[in-house]
Image (spheres, rainbow, N blue to C red):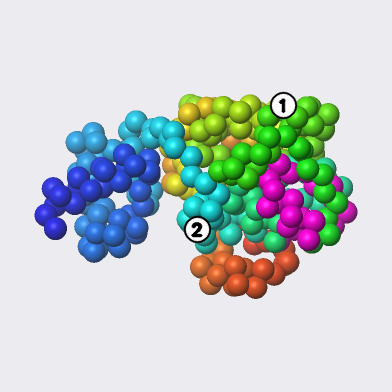
Amino acid sequence: MLQQERMERIVAELASSGAVKVAQLASALHVSESTIRRDICMLNDSGRLKKVFGGAVALQPHIKTVEEDIADRAETRVQEKLCIARYAAAFITDEDFVFIDAGSTTENMIDFLQAKRAVYVTNGLTHGRKLAQRGFRLYMTGGRLKGATLSLIGAEAMDFIRRCNFTKCFMGADGVDTLRGYSTPDIDEAQFKTEVLRHSRQAYILADSSKFGVISAVTFGRIEEATIITDRLADDAFRRLTVINEAEGTDTVCTADRLHRTNSVPLHGKGSRREK
């Protein structure tokens, strides 16, 4: 493959996903990582992308308007989501009143929960089933069922949340951007997520590295309103705005988690924990 063709592929991938990693590009394009780094440096110098540690991000944030259904989400970035979920589950104690948002990464959290005396609330149908099967004390929000995400939203769900005062909430996001904050494609879902943030003492956003630099259709929270738990942070600009926790875990550990679903305490990662 010629260098110009290779660089156009890199730019096209950025237009689609908003961020790329050197290792992933090298594998996809069948070249060495040093070759990809040189390509990224040339594209950075020509003003076509922004070079960051380990890869590159688009100069203009990717606007995500199409929402994947929950089955498709569950099959993408599986290892990263498991590491994030395992790490996030350690933040919950027996004294907590917790909201767990619908989503593939938050669903993985349930396999690693240790706090049996905590009270859990969720708007995710699959989340509710798994929490109930594990014997946790559980409440469902009620509301209108959204088929794509199997989540409960709408007026009834909002009314439920307004009566709650959560100690912690764990939320998903389709986009995480320094200026536009946390975003999702659906207006009703964004309004629901905003209400949860307002009624939580401490908020956590669970987002793998592909979500950074992406803007979805509707913003539901500002960056500083939540602690971010991710697998790896490529752009340190986010670290200046809020607390970032990077989950550390090898592929071997994460694969074992997926196969055996152990209930051991999550690995500790980089970053600090913050209470409001």
Of badges 1 and 2, the one in the foreground is 1
Report the quarter where the N terminus lies.
bottom left
C-alpha distance separating marks 1 and 2: 31 Å
Q: Nearer the viewer, residue 77 or 158?
A: 158
Q: What is the span of residues highlighted in magenta in the rendered image?
A: 112-133
The local crowd at label 2, few if under 14, some if 14 to 19, many if 20 or more residues have their Cα within 10 Å, is few
Q: Name the residue type under label 2.
A: Glu
Residue at 55 percent across and 49 percent down: it is 70
SS assignment at label 2: loop
Using the image, determine if residue 180 lies above or below residue 119.
Answer: above
Tag 1's secondary structure? Answer: helix
Q: Can residue 237 be seen in this view?
A: no
Task: Judge from the rendering whether residue 54 lies leftward or rightward of residue 167; answer left or right.
Answer: left
Category of crowding for the residue at label 1, using alpha-carbon neighbours closer than 10 angstroms: few (below 14), some (14–19), many (at least 20): some
In the rendered structure, the answer to whether residue 240 lies left or right of residue 213 reads right
| Discs 1, 2 touching: Cβ within 8 Å | no
Above or below residue 254? Residue 52 is above
Residue at the disc numbered 1 = 155
Left or right: residue 64 versus residue 89 is left
Which percent across, then down, holds residue 20?
Answer: 35, 48
Q: In which quarter of the image is residue 24?
A: bottom left
Choose the circle earlier in sequence order: 1 or 2. 2
Q: Residue at x 19, y 36 (%)?
A: 46
| One can see residue 255 in this view | yes
How far from the left and from the top, in percent, is residue 234? 44, 46
Magenta span has 134? no
Amino acid beneath label 1: Ala
Residue 241 in the image: x percent, y percent?
55, 32
Residue where numbered disc 2 is placed: 75
Q: Is residue 120 magenta?
A: yes
Instruction: Identify the residue at image location x=59%, y=43%.
Output: 147
Give me the residue at 47% from left, 32% from top.
216
